[in-house]
Amino acid sequence: MYRFLVTPRWWAINIFAVLAIPVCVLMGSWQLSRFDDRVDRHQEQQEQSTAQSHAEARPLRELLPLTQETVGRTAEVTGRFDTAHPLLVPDRTVEDERGFYVLSLLRTDATDGDKAVPVVRGWLPGKADPDRVPAPPKGEVTVTGVLQASESHTDAGSGATGGLPDGQLGFISAAALVNVVPYGVEDAWLTEQRTQAPLRPVPPVAPDNTGLDMKAFQNLGYTAQWFVFAGFVVFMWFRFFRREAELAKDAALGLIPDEQSESRPDGPEAGAGPPGPSSEDAATRSRSPA
């Protein structure tokens, strides 16, 4: 009754199911592992943040180049602030209040190539106004702050995506600073947590593609999607199999008419013209008078 399973059509169906189901399960498992990695990294960041609040600052040179393990660490670096290039980063929100970052470049020899280190000295509410910003400390200073990854244009505020006036920057990165200052800049930045009044500290943020962000829940959604695909393939295979098995059973019981008998010309419905005269009609006509 199941001889249909060895037909070419069912060979194709079986091969597709055998290949599709493991692929869907494999892709779903991979997406689930991505989500688990993000959960683990989020927990590590939480533990690291708690530990860093009580940990001593490490020299910046030991934490560079920046990695996912060193982002969020407390770093210490000594140098001199560049007072000739003060910068503001507008349209930044802290505790649901819109304002701007105060950014200064620290010239130091504690980085490769003596690159300057961008330092966010703090945040002020309202529109970016250089007259409200206190001047950076003069002379050699030691800065302690949380190490942060460079931003991209997607991190710029809605009001900082167009042309900005001199002295303002849309996002903090070496790529954005390359045409602003005449020296090299480190591709990372520090946010001071002990700020100069009236500046308020900028809370550190987790780097992209880490933690429980929208991308993490996208991985979880893709996981469910791939497993649903695998279940759908199994469901459709059994549905086709049951239909073919029922048809084969009906044919074996004679419930399905034979296609060959229907096509024979001597069947009860064969013949396209009108019926000819019967033998009785012919006999009656022969006995009637001429």
Image (spheres, helix red, strand yellow):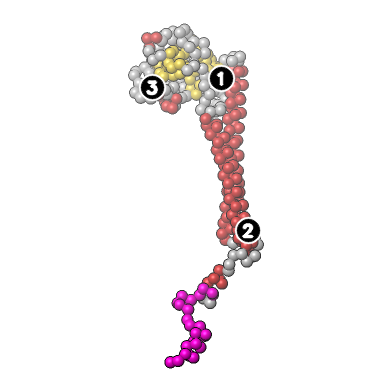
Tell me whether the residue at label 3 lies in contact with that at label 1, contact meaning CB atoms closer than 8 angstroms: no
Q: Residues within 10 Å of mark 3 (few under 14, many from 20)?
A: few
The picture places residue 153, in percent across and down from the top left corner, at: 42, 27
Task: Give the foreground label among 3 and 2.
Answer: 2
Task: Give the foreground label among 1 and 2.
Answer: 2
Q: Amino acid at mark 3?
A: Gly
Q: Nearer the viewer, residue 240 or 120?
A: 240
The residue at which mark 2 appears reads as 245
Seen at 44% across and 12% down, the residue is 124
Task: Give the spatial CA distance, label 3 vs label 2.
Answer: 66 Å
Q: Residues within 10 Å of mark 1 (few under 14, many from 20)?
A: many
Task: Give the foreground label among 3 and 1.
Answer: 3
Q: Which mark is residue 73?
A: 1
Q: Is residue 276 magenta?
A: yes
The residue at which mark 3 appears reads as 159
Q: Amino acid at mark 1?
A: Arg
Is 283 placed above or below 88 here?
below
Seen at 58% across and 67% down, the residue is 257
Q: Amino acid at mark 2?
A: Ala
Seen at 42% across and 24% down, the residue is 156
Q: Nearer the viewer, residue 234 or 22?
A: 234
Tell me whether the residue at label 3 lies in contact with that at label 2, contact meaning CB atoms closer than 8 angstroms: no
Task: Give the spatial CA distance, label 1 vs label 2.
Answer: 66 Å
The picture places residue 203, in percent across and down from the top left corner, at: 51, 17
Task: Give the spatial CA distance, label 3 vs label 1.
Answer: 30 Å
Is 132 placed above or below 61 here?
above
Q: What's drawn in magenta, residue-wise?
A: 267-290
The quadrant of the rendering that contains the C terminus is bottom left
The picture places residue 204, in percent across and down from the top left corner, at: 52, 19
Task: Assign a secondary structure to mark 2.
Answer: helix
Quick check: 204 left or right of 87? right
